[in-house]
Amino acid sequence: METQSFVLGVLATYGLTMTAFVIKGMVKISRLVKQQKSLEDFISNTRLEMDSRENEIRRILSETNREITMVEKTIMQRIDNEIENTRRQLQNEVQFIHKHEDEIEKELNRKISDAFSYTDSRIDKVVLSGSLKSVKKTLV
């Protein structure tokens, strides 16, 4: 019986030691599972945050692109308006110059006509007075 008790004692000690190792292994496995779960959650949260930031960056880029397009359109409209205003001003100035040229031409024509009329009247007066009869006869 002593041997039997000894064997049972050794087996019991061995069983308790094995149980302790199994429990210690299960605790380690449990910690590793918790750590793995924690890491998976961290990775998942990091991916969600990265996706969120990527979406925010895309939104900001899209908004910036829209703003740039709007500013570009505004600038182009202003340039077009300025070009159109300048074109109109040039047309008005050209019309004014042509109108002024016409007025000057009419005034010159009137003065030339007046000068011819005056010269003709002076020649007629001289001819009527008789002082140029002899010259006129020789010219004719």
Image (cartoon, grey):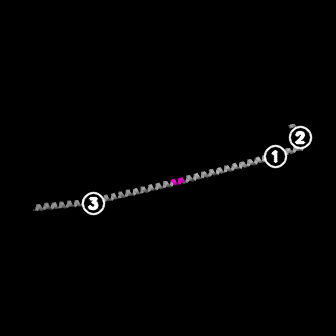
Q: Nearer the viewer, residue 12 or 103?
A: 103
Residue that carries the numbered disc 1 in the rendered image: 117
Label 3: which secondary element = helix
**Badge 1 density bin: few <14, some 14–19, many ≥20, Cα 10 Å:** few
Please state, as top left, top right, bottom left or bottom right, where the N terminus lies in the image: bottom left
Q: Tell me which corner region of the image, top left, top right, bottom left or bottom right, holds residue 34.
A: bottom left
User: Which labelled disc corresponds to residue 12?
Assistant: none
Where 15 falls versus 126 (above or below)? below
Residues shaded magenta: 69-73
Percent position of residue 50, x then y: 40, 56
User: Which labelled disc corresponds to residue 30?
Assistant: 3
Residue that carries the numbered disc 2 in the rendered image: 133
Look at discs 3 and 2 and give the one toward the viewer. Answer: 2
Percent position of residue 135, x then y: 88, 39
Look at discs 1 and 3 and give the one toward the viewer. Answer: 1
What amino acid type is highlighted by mark number 3?
Ser
